[in-house]
Amino acid sequence: MLDISERQQSVEKQLERASHLTEQLKTTLEEFSLKKGEIEEDVQEFLDWVTQTKEFLKQTDDTSGTDEDLLRRLESAQVIHHTYMFYIY
């Protein structure tokens, strides 16, 4: 049977371990919070790009004009497509 001193030592060891685990959890949560912020910034940047691209593509939807106008719009749409593929992959 454990005496009071042994029980106290056991409790102190458990408290030390709990304190250590608490510090690890705190560090992990701080890292998670930083990553979350980075991801939110990346998502916002992508959404801004998508919005700008959508507005630009509305302009390329116009099928009126000369062959040169249509070709310029097609080339612009192709550039956007390649940029989009870059974001995706």
Image: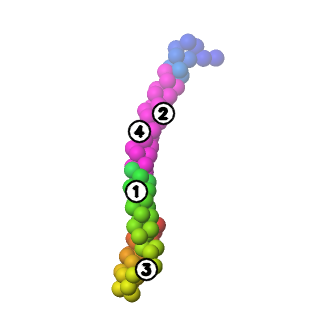
SS at badge 3: loop
Mark 1 and mark 2: span between their CA atoms? 40 Å
* Residue 61 lies in the magenta stretch: no
Q: Are marks 4 and 3 in contact (CB under 8 Å)?
A: no
Q: Which amino acid does the dot numbered 1 rest on? A: Asp
Mark 4 and mark 3: span between their CA atoms? 55 Å
* 3 or 2: tag closer to the N-terminus: 2
Q: Which amino acid does the dot numbered 3 rest on? A: Ser
* 4 or 3: tag closer to the N-terminus: 4
Residue designated by label 4: 30
Q: Residue at x 42, y 73 (%)?
A: 60
Q: Position of residue 59 (x, y in %)?
A: 41, 70
Could you classify mark 1 by the number of other residues whose Cα lies within 10 Å: few (under 14), some (14-19), or many (20 or more)?
few
Question: Mark 4 against mark 3, which lies toward the viewer?
Answer: 3
Whether residue 45 appears in this view of the structure is: yes
Q: Position of residue 10 (x, y in %)?
A: 53, 22
Q: Are marks 3 and 1 in contact (CB under 8 Å)?
A: no
Question: Mark 4 against mark 1, which lies toward the viewer?
Answer: 1
Residue designated by label 2: 21
* Residue 22 lies in the magenta stretch: yes
Q: Which amino acid does the dot numbered 2 rest on? A: Leu
Q: Residue at x 45, y 79 (%)?
A: 63
Residue designated by label 1: 48
Range of residues picked out in magenta = 12-40
Mark 3 and mark 2: span between their CA atoms? 67 Å
SS at badge 2: helix
Could you classify mark 3 by the number of other residues whose Cα lies within 10 Å: few (under 14), some (14-19), or many (20 or more)?
few
- Label for residue 64? 3
Q: Which amino acid does the dot numbered 4 rest on? A: Glu
Mark 4 and mark 1: span between their CA atoms? 27 Å
Q: Residue at x 46, y 28 (%)?
A: 19
